[in-house]
Amino acid sequence: MRKPPLLTLALICMITLAGCESDARMSEHGFRLPDGDAEAGRETFVYMQCTQCHSIKGEKFEEFPGMDPPYVELGGTVTQVKTYGQLVTAIINPSHQLARGYAEEVVSENGESNMYNYNRHMTVQELTDLVMYLQPTYDVVVPKYQYRVYPTT
């Protein structure tokens, strides 16, 4: 007996939808901001006063009078690639992942990042420029592992 085409189509749709993740609409797939300008990104870094709390490996910035030196260094040698997405996320959602290797009270209060939320003050162009400036400051190296050699008997 032949099933009505509408019932078959409905069944196929239900099976297809069951296989979809509920968070698929929140996927980063297809997300890409335009390229930025690294020189403009450095200007944004200074203009947004990021140098109050951050330094960049190998860069010198004007110090703020009466302020402690920057305490969270960006750039330098890392063992994990700092991707475009990670840098964008760190800027627009700084509490997503707090800086490791620093005392908790230095980088956060009650689990929230001490970094100012620039989302209402930074343009998309400034964001893309800033990411374009920061990304090349990271030098990715393969971590060195020490393996214990056990004697054979």
Image: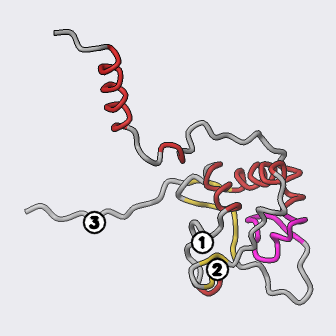
Q: Is residue 62 left or right of residue 92?
A: right
Residue type, label 3: Arg
Q: Are marks 1 and 2 in contact (CB under 8 Å)?
A: yes
Residue under numbered circle 2: 107
In this rendering, is residue 18 above or below 46? above
Q: Locate residue 146, reporting x and y percent.
A: 36, 64
Q: Locate residue 106, reporting x and y percent.
A: 65, 84
Q: Is residue 101 left or right of residue 16?
A: right
Mark 2: secondary structure? helix
Q: Is residue 81 left or right of residue 19?
A: right
89 falls in the magenta region: no
Residue under numbered circle 1: 99
Nearer-the-camera pick, 65 or 89: 89
Q: Locate residue 120, reporting x and y percent.
A: 81, 63
Q: Residue at x 27, y 65 (%)?
A: 148
Residue under numbered circle 3: 148
In this rendering, is residue 39 above or below 152? above
Q: Residue at x 76, y 48 (%)?
A: 132
